[in-house]
Image (cartoon, grey):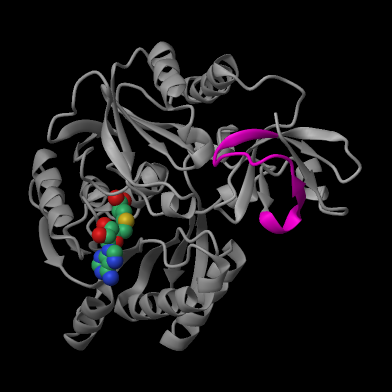
């Protein structure tokens, strides 16, 4: 096995068990390991610190797989996958009312670059890094063994693979192709999921608890759901007794599926309105027409992937939050989210505070939201916390 030696003084983060080694922390690498090859990590003095997959193409050149002196092989992988899956079992995240859940959440489950989501009888997998890409066969057979699920589909059509020098990939890994539309239950609500073509692996599983929370705020209320995708928050708002929900998303396909999801849940007297459009523009149009709402949800896509994009992301968040505050009725409630890794919780709260100030409203935070337990945040990997949400109540 080749070795990677860290620069003096750059061992600290590995000693704190952070799984990323940036190219700037590396003094030398022996031989010429291929992208994704496992190498030994040594301190500048030559002490063994662990083993990482090495990728000369990525600025995150090393992803540490183990900080112990152990062999990384298929039984190592299976044991990590088992631990991750057992946690979800212990928490009963899959049950009679919930048939979808993330089983493996990459670095936060000790498996850098690996995502596995269960949707009923299907597993959907993403291989995000060159390191994990090399173990695809072992991972598929491990998942089969641990879950008993045969139909496994790959959705590695994600931008981050480019940073790793990998092509995007999708297709069947085992068993049978998923049907065009798969049905899942979330808190007893029924959703159609497009595993093969939907965003991410088909559904935003990370928002489950927050959708449930919204339900508590919508009885007899008018609701505006911005960035509504396939209607997750819309369905919960209706379940909570909303009298009206307007949903906005730029994706026509997502909007169509969202309408089907509302029908699928057989809501009675409430009414719905749909806009396939740009939230930034539509919020201005709603303001100009004098429309107002009791509850507003803002769940935009990632505005900043890296810290370099934070300023423009901040402007985007400020803009939509300011408009939302203006559209809220007195006593109204805003559910506002950021899933940008580069935007910290503190910064997000500051942006929302500035938006309220500029909108001329007095608002308080009455709830802090995060990603669900199936998207854990390893304490040695704070970057794992990407989803931040606030429930703000306007006076
Ligand atoms: N709240 C959703 C997930 C939202 S993901 C849920 O619970 O399922 C972000 C969504 O924003 C995607 O559906 C994407 O199509 C949409 N989107 C991205 N940019 C947009 C824009 N400028 N205007 C409207 N929708 C946008």
Q: Quadrant of residue 151?
A: top left
Q: Residue 81's x, y, as percent?
A: 52, 23
Instruction: Work out whether 273 lies above or below 131.
Output: below
User: Is residue 230 found left or right of 186 in the rendered image?
Assistant: left
Task: Give the residue at x 42% y 67%.
Answer: 303
Q: Nearer the viewer, residue 59 or 83?
A: 59
| Residue 30 lies in the magenta-colored region | yes
- The answer to whether residue 100 is above or below residue 62 is above
Ligand 1 picture quarter: bottom left
Location of the N terminus (image quadrant): top right
Residue 307 rendering spot, x and y as whole percentages: 57, 68
Q: Which residues, given as a range, are shown in magenta? A: 23-39
Q: Can the viewer see residue 34 in this picture?
A: yes
Name the one closer to the observer, 152 or 39: 39
Which residue occupies 58% across, 45% down? 55
Asked where in the image residue 379 lies, by quadrant, the reply is top right
Task: Kindly identify the residue that appears in the image at 58 percent across and 17 percent down.
Answer: 79
The image position of residue 125, as x and y in percent, is 37, 33
| Left or right placement of residue 263 versus residue 19 in this view | left
Give how far across and how far down residue 35 sits, in percent: 54, 42
| Left or right: 127 in relation to 218 | right
């Amino acid at each position: 096995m080749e070795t990677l030696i860290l620069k003096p003084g750059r061992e600290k983060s590995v000693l704190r068990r952070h799984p990323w080694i940036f190219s700037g922390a590396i003094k030398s690498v022996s031989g010429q390991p291929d992208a994704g090859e496992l190498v030994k990590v040594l301190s500048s003095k030559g002490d063994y610190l662990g083993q990482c997959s090495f990728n000369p193409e990525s600025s995150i050149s090393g992803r540490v797989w183990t900080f112990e002196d152990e062999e990384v092989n298929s039984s190592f992988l299976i044991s990590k996958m088992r631990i991750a899956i057992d946690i979800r079992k212990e928490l009963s995240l899959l049950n009679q009312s919930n048939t979808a859940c993330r089983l493996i959440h990459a670095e936060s489950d000790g498996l850098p670059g690996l995502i596995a989501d269960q949707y009923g009888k299907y597993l959907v997998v993403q291989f995000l890094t060159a390191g994990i890409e090399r173990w695809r066969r072992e991972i598929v057979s491990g998942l089969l063994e641990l879950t008993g699920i045969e139909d496994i589909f790959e959705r590695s059509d994600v931008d981050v693979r480019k940073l790793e020098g990998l092509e995007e990939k999708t297709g069947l890994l085992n068993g049978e192709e998923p049907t065009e539309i798969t049905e899942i239950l979330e808190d007893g609500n029924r959703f159609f999921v497009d595993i093969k073509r939907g965003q991410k692996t088909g559904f935003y599983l990370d928002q489950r608890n927050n959708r449930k929370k919204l339900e508590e705020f919508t009885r007899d209320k008018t609701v505006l759901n911005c960035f509504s995708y396939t209607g997750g928050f819309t369905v919960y708002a209706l379940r909570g007794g909303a009298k009206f929900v307007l949903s906005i998303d730029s994706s026509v396909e997502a909007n169509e599926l969202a309408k089907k999801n509302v029908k699928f849940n057989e809501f009675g007297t409430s009414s719905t309105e749909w806009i396939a459009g740009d939230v930034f523009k539509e919020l201005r149009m709603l303001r100009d027409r004098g429309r107002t709402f009791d509850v507003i949800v803002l769940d935009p896509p990632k505005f900043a992937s890296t810290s370099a994009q934070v300023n423009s992301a901040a402007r985007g968040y400020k803009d939509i939050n300011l408009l939302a505050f203006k559209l809220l009725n007195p006593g109204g409630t805003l559910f506002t989210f950021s899933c940008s890794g580069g935007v910290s919780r503190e910064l997000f709260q500051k942006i929302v505070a500035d938006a309220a100030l500029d909108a001329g409203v007095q608002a308080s935070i009455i709830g802090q939201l995060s990603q669900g337990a199936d998207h854990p945040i390893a304490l040695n990997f704070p970057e794992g916390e990407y989803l931040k949400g606030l429930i703000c109540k306007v006076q």
